[in-house]
Amino acid sequence: FQLVTQFRQAVEQGDIVVHYQPKVRLSDDEVIGAEALVRWSHPEFGLVSPAEFVEAIETTGSIEILLEHVLDIVLAQIQAWTARDRRLSVSVNLSMRNLLAERFLETVAGQLERYGVPPELLLFEITESSVMARPEVSLPVLRDLANLGVQLSVDDFGTGYSSLAYLRRLPIDEMKIDKSFVQGMATDMGDHAIVKAIVELAHNLGLVVVAEGVEGAETKTMLEKMGCDQMQGFLLSRPLPVDKFETWLKTRA
Ligand code: G
Ligand code: G
Ligand code: NA
Ligand code: MN
């Protein structure tokens, strides 16, 4: 399969790059971390979104190569920031296939040790729908992962079919409200009500709650009023290559 061969070559050539989108704490506007979003810098097609290739490589072992590569980049970056006294956490997206891979925990534990990064500075995002698809399989892996000291986040919350009884048993730290609700909340009462309910649910479960896809100042104000903990979105910044991300950080300081 040609895409897979090309992907493996792209990893070796350094064409698979990571962009960072800032995560900000609403109570004091501090930048506390970033989400790592992968892109394929393709010689012919330009910057290709993961939406175009992640699904295709998921059906092959290449999704494990992607995770190892992203962890190499991200952990080296956290290490560099820590050395400069800049404490930033980074969130990495996981696909269900990553969780199921035989060497998954070994890989994560090995990489953390190799880079000497405090595990709590690494977060993993798993979508609500993939966690809930096979709870009996994902729960033990998530427990082992949490025992490594990394933080876990449920992504795109509100779009899947969560059993609340099951959700309560997950060893998670954070919930991310799906951007479809956040984007609608300033104009749609239903979306507003859903966001408010998720913020309360998260807090009642002892979780940090993050709104993604914040594009307007009015939305940010509403989230502050609701007591939402953190936000992410184009209002702050699009995902940026690391040099541009660091420039953006300086302009805020
Ligand atoms: O940044 P963008 O909107 O193009 O991302 C599209 C999708 O790709 C998002 O759902 C995001 O979670 C996913 N994605 C981004 N980076 C990674 C990654 O490193 N691994 C996996 N599995 N998915 C990723
Ligand atoms: O599935 P996941 O939540 O990981 O997807 C994150 C995706 O959302 C990324 O592709 C990122 O580029 C995109 N994104 C981040 N902030 C915004 C925003 O404010 N508006 C929109 N439309 N997309 C956003
Ligand atoms: Na995500
Ligand atoms: Mn999401």
Image (tube, grey):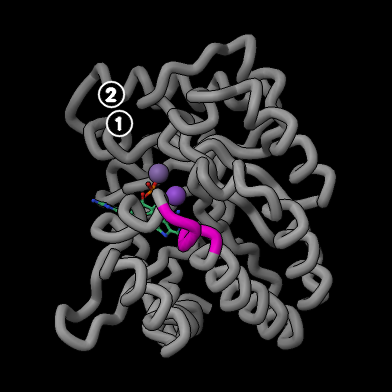
Q: Image quadrant of ligand 1? A: bottom left
Find disc 2 in the rendering and name its residue: 191
The residue drawn where x is 27% and y is 35% is 180
Give the structural element (helix, strand or loop) at label 2. Answer: helix
- Return the x and y of residue 81 as percentages of the image width and height: 67, 81
Disc ID at residue 181:
1
Question: Mark 1 and mark 2: span between their CA atoms?
Answer: 5 Å
Q: Is residue 92 left or right of residue 242?
A: right
Say few, some or many: other residues with alpha carbon within 10 Å of mark 1 (under 14 / 14 to 19 / 20 or more).
Answer: many
State left or right for residue 174 relative to residue 62.
right
Q: Is residue 167 above or below residue 111?
A: above
Q: Is residue 207 above or below residue 28?
A: above
The amino acid pointed to by label 1 is Phe
The secondary element bearing badge 1 is classed as: helix
Q: Which residues are magenta?
A: 60-64
Q: Is residue 30 visible?
A: no
> Which residue is drawn at the image coordinates 78% and 71% (left, top)?
117
Amino acid type, callout 2 = Asp
- Sequence-wise first label, 1 or 2: 1
From the image, which quarter does the N terminus lie in? Answer: bottom left
Is disc 1 in contact with disc 2, using a CB cutoff of under 8 Å?
yes
Q: Give residue 113's quadrant in the image.
A: bottom right
Disc 1 C-beta below 8 A from ligand 4: no
Mark carried by residue 246: none
- Residue 111 location (% of width, % of height): 74, 69
Q: Quadrant of residue 43?
A: bottom left
